[in-house]
Amino acid sequence: MARWRFLSRLAATALTAVSVGAVTLAAPANAAPEGDVTPFVVGGTRAAQGEFPFMVRLSMGCGGALYSPRLVLTAAHCVGRTGSNSSITATLGVVDLQSSSRIQVRSNYVYRAPGYNGYGDDWALIRLASAVSGLSTLPIATSSAYDSGTFTVAGWGATREGGAQQRYMMKASVPFVSDSVCNGPSSYDGDVIPAEEICAGYMAGGVDTCQGDSGGPMFRQGGSGLVQVGIVSWGYGCARANYPGVYTQVSYFSSAIASAAASLGG
């Protein structure tokens, strides 16, 4: 079954100018989905320019969020090993990836969660070669206080399972799904790591994140503004019934993320 919501660098270049649809979440482009494919665009809307200024598009086909003016928080499965890396280009400041106003900055270092082995610990930090000015950052949740309710997801991923990624950033709202339901026999049946992962979506299907949205943030209103509670990680297909999206639970890793960020210059 499909796991990651990552799309290869080659497939990431296949952007479409069609702006209908929402964000969904699926398998890598080279993985054939099991069972019936749902060949329709899931519900959502196009994000407005400036609505989510912390959103980042990464050249390997993933998303991310601006943790600080020089650091991007993304998924571990989107990057290689920890070390110097100047191969990633971050695009920021726009909803239209082809906008002449876009900001593009190269990476110079990647920090991948040391516990990541293809299962769990799915977070990473990318340090940019220069700090970005004029864009707000997205604070991360440091407790589980905001790990329920209704969340927002956004990104440039495909709007249907197996589809092309989008030129324009899309957004959608998804509700929290408890560990007992998400990990139950009619859903992921024990594959979710309760302490490290959080599920969100509709059990009836229809709204989700999709291929190309990996690493992007899931966020909600906090005490004094938006706060990131999840990182797009994995799932079975796009917006399928009984299979909500599975996200890295940021609050569980907040101390480790903060420590890594400090080691990279904050």
Image: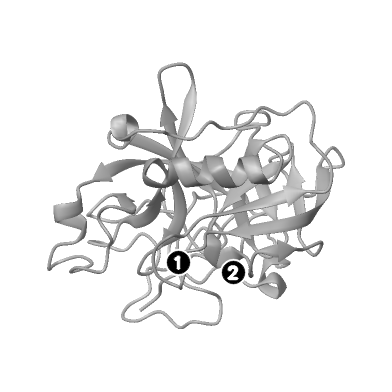
- Disc 1 marks a residue whose amino acid type is Ala
Q: Residues within 10 Å of mark 2 (few under 14, many from 20)?
A: many
Q: Residues within 10 Å of mark 1 (few under 14, many from 20)?
A: many
Residue that appears at 37% across and 51% down:
207
Q: Nearer the viewer, residue 2 or 16?
A: 2
Query: Could you tell me residue 216's position as x and y percent?
Result: 54, 49
Residue that appears at 31% across and 50% down:
198
| 1 or 2: tag closer to the N-terminus | 2
Residue that appears at 39% across and 53% down:
247
Which residue is label 2 attached to? 7
Q: Quadrant of the C terminus?
A: top right
Could you tell me which secondary element the residue under label 1 belongs to?
loop
Q: Which mark is residue 26?
A: 1
Q: Is residue 189 left or right of residue 219?
A: left
Could you tell me which secondary element the residue under label 2 belongs to?
loop
The total of numbered circles placed on residues is: 2
Q: Is residue 163 left or right of residue 191?
A: right
Residue 47 visible from this viewpoint: yes
Vertical position of residue 105 compared to residue 51: above or below: below
Q: In the displayed image of the protein, which residue is found farthest to the top?
A: 224
Q: Nearer the viewer, residue 250 or 225?
A: 250
Q: Is residue 58 left or right of residue 141?
A: right
Vertical position of residue 75 compared to residue 56: above or below: below
Vertical position of residue 179 compared to residue 69: above or below: below
Marks 1 and 2, how far apart at CA: 9 Å
Query: Could you tell me residue 228's position as x and y percent?
Result: 47, 37
Residue that appears at 41% across and 23% down:
222
Query: Could you tell me residue 120's position as x and y percent?
Result: 39, 63
Residue 168 visible from this viewpoint: no
